[in-house]
Structure formats: C-alpha cells, structure tokens
Image: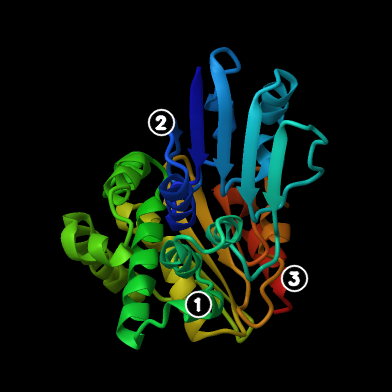
C-alpha cells in the first residue's frame, strides 16, 4: 500500500512537506507540479492507496477527487490556507484549514509540529510574501538581520522556481527541488551547500531585471496592470515581481499578465498589502481562476476578456 504526498510546487508547499517529513519520515510517492497546477489530488488512485497528505492546494478545487478517497476509507491529512468551500465530514479526514490572509500552509504545519522546524516555516512565509508574519514567527530563533534576509531570499527563490505554464519553464521540477531540500534540517546549510540556490538566485536576478524594464499597461494609485511578452522569463517572474511591487506599493493592487500561446494570458494578482483581501474573489470570476485572499491567479485568460478583467480588477480594488 502506498502513501502519497500531494503538494503545491512553490515555497509554501515544499517547505510544508519538508517540515512534516523531517518530523515524521515516511516513504511516499510525490505528486506536485508547477505552482498553478493545483488539481493534483486526481492523480492519486483509490486502488492501492493507504493514506494521503495534501498540502497548499485548495480543497474546493480538489473536492471531486478527494471524496472518492474518503469514501474508500483512505486516511487523508489536509493542510491549506486557500478557499476550501464546505469541508467533508469524514472521520478519516484530518483537515487543518486556515484562510487568514496572514498565514500560509508552512505556518499551519509549524503549529501542528510545535515549531519543531520553525526556520523552514519562516522560509515558507517569506516565499508567500508574508514578510511580517515571517518576521514575527522567526523571533524565537533569535536570528540576525543578515540571517533573516537569507531566509527571505531562500523563500523567494523557492517560490520563483514554481512559476511557469509548464515544467519546461522552470529551473527545477518541484519534486526534484524538494528532493534537493530534503537532506537539510537547517535551511542555512542548504543555502551554503546546494548549487540549486546559486542557480536560482542568478536566474531570479536576470529575470527581475527584464521585468523591471516593462512599463505598466494601465496604472493608477490603486491598481497597476502589466502585460509581459510570450517568454519563459515572464512566466517565471510574474508572481515574484508582483510580490516585489506589492512590498514597494502597499496601497496598490497589482496584476501581472504573461502572454501565452493561443491568444491569452497567465495572470497573477496581488491584493494591496494594506488590505490583503479580494484577489481570490476577483480571479474566481474567470473560468480558470482561483487562489487566496491576498494572492490569486488565472491560468488562462482569453485575450478577448482583457478589458473585462481590467474592469473587474479596478472594480474589485476601488480604482
């Protein structure tokens, strides 16, 4: 019988799983993908499955695949901070869902583990652009400013690696990146010893330079919408650049549209940091949209719906 670890391919998903498996080692089959690939539970078969852990993907988006597992008596542990909808009342479901805009799955897991691997939870929070939450959580570690900055960089890079429309856009497949993180109890040892950190840092800096040269398509004091070309750098950088802009302009909402083949866009939305709500509500108005209150996205926005999206974006955030 097989255990499956199902997790988002970003910093939060990787760091949440890493904390759990440091505390509770377990042989498992990994199920993950690019950050936007959240319909992952459907990859878990009912036949031959003993138990499942699901991390950092919306229960609402995975309900149709989750219910057959529960009905078959398979034990499921589910930790997440995205919109869940109604949580099934099943004795074999252990659900830890908190949609507060100031938390992430890594911090939820950290609570379950009584801060056994807190530095990785802090890394997860930084990766999800929760800088204040990360700094607050890190206080018991008594880190220097330089060490805190290192964890911020690591979280940003792990998150950066997850963005793209396919695995070909990424520097590392998320499952492979998790395997590289897996040997390290201490994130500072990973930073020091694994070449993946250096490779991601170089790629991030290069992509960010290109992003910063792109002028907004439409901007005001309350909203800014950017359109990037059809290029792998744009798909990789859209989310982390949105996070960066959100930190610089905390009263403004941001939307990053990366041009895709097929006459459409990959969309990343960040609510204003001063009021971290509404991003998921906006994106769920569109067919392939979803996410959380502070940060959400649309996997494919048809070009014909650009004006509709921009109007909804401005309406959502009061521009």
In which image quadrant can residue 282 be found?
bottom right
**Can you say whether 116 is above or below 275 in the image?**
above
Residue displayed at 35% across by 87% down? 145
Q: Which residue is mark 1?
A: 131
Q: Residues within 10 Å of mark 3 (few under 14, many from 20)?
A: few
Disc 3 element: helix
Q: Nearer the viewer, mark 2 or mark 1?
A: 2
Q: Is residue 143 left or right of residue 319?
A: left
Compare residues 274 and 224 and report the one nearer the observer.
Answer: 274
Q: Residues within 10 Å of mark 2 (few under 14, many from 20)?
A: few
Q: Is residue 148 left or right of residue 194?
A: right
Q: Is residue 207 left or right of residue 120?
A: left
Residue displayed at 70% across by 65% down? 100
Mark 2–mark 1 Cα distance, whole angstroms, equals: 33 Å
Mark 3–mark 1 Cα distance, whole angstroms, equals: 27 Å
Checking the image for residue 315, the label placed there is 3
Q: Position of residue 250 (x, y in %)?
A: 57, 84
Q: How is the image coloured?
A: rainbow
Q: Residues within 10 Å of mark 1 (few under 14, many from 20)?
A: some
Compare residues 56 and 61 and report the one nearer the observer.
Answer: 56
Q: Quadrant of the C terminus?
A: bottom right
Residue displayed at 41% across by 59% down? 159
Q: Which residue is mark 2?
A: 27
Q: Earlier in the sequence, mark 2 or mark 1?
A: 2
Q: Position of residue 315 (x, y in %)?
A: 75, 70
In which image quadrant can residue 165 be found?
top left
**Can you say whether 224 is above or below 238 in the image?**
below
Disc 1 element: helix
């Amino acid at each position: 019988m097989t255990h499956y670890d199902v997790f988002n391919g970003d910093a939060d998903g990787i760091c949440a799983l890493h904390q759990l498996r440091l505390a509770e080692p377990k042989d498992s089959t990994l199920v993950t993908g690019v950050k936007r690939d959240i319909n992952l539970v459907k990859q878990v078969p009912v036949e031959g499955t003993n138990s499942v852990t699901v991390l950092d993907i919306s229960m609402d988006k995975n309900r149709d695949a989750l219910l057959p597992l529960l009905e078959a008596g398979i034990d499921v542990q589910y930790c997440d901070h995205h919109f869940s909808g109604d949580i099934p009342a099943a004795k074999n479901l252990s659900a830890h869902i908190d949609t507060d805009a100031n938390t992430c799955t890594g911090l939820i897991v950290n609570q379950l583990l009584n801060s056994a691997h807190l530095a990785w939870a802090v890394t997860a929070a930084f990766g999800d652009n929760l800088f204040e939450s990360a700094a607050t959580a890190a206080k018991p570690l008594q880190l220097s400013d330089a060490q805190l900055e290192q964890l911020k960089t690591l979280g940003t890079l792990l998150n950066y690696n997850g963005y793209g429309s396919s695995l070909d856009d990424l520097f590392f497949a998320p499952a492979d990146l998790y395997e590289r993180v897996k040997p390290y109890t201490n994130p500072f040892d990973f930073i020091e010893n694994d070449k993946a950190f250096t490779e991601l840092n170089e790629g991030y800096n290069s992509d960010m330079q290109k992003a910063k040269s792109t002028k907004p398509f439409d901007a005001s004091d309350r909203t800014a919408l950017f359109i990037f070309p059809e290029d792998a750098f744009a798909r990789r950088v859209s989310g982390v650049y949105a996070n960066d802009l959100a930190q610089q302009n905390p009263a403004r909402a941001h939307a990053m549209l990366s041009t895709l083949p097929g006459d459409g866009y990959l969309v990343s939305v960040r609510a204003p940091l001063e009021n971290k709500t509404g991003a998921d509500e906006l994106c769920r108005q569109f067919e392939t949209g979803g996410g959380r209150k502070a940060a959400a996205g649309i996997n494919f926005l048809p070009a014909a719906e650009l004006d509709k999206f921009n109007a909804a974006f401005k309406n959502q955030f009061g521009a």
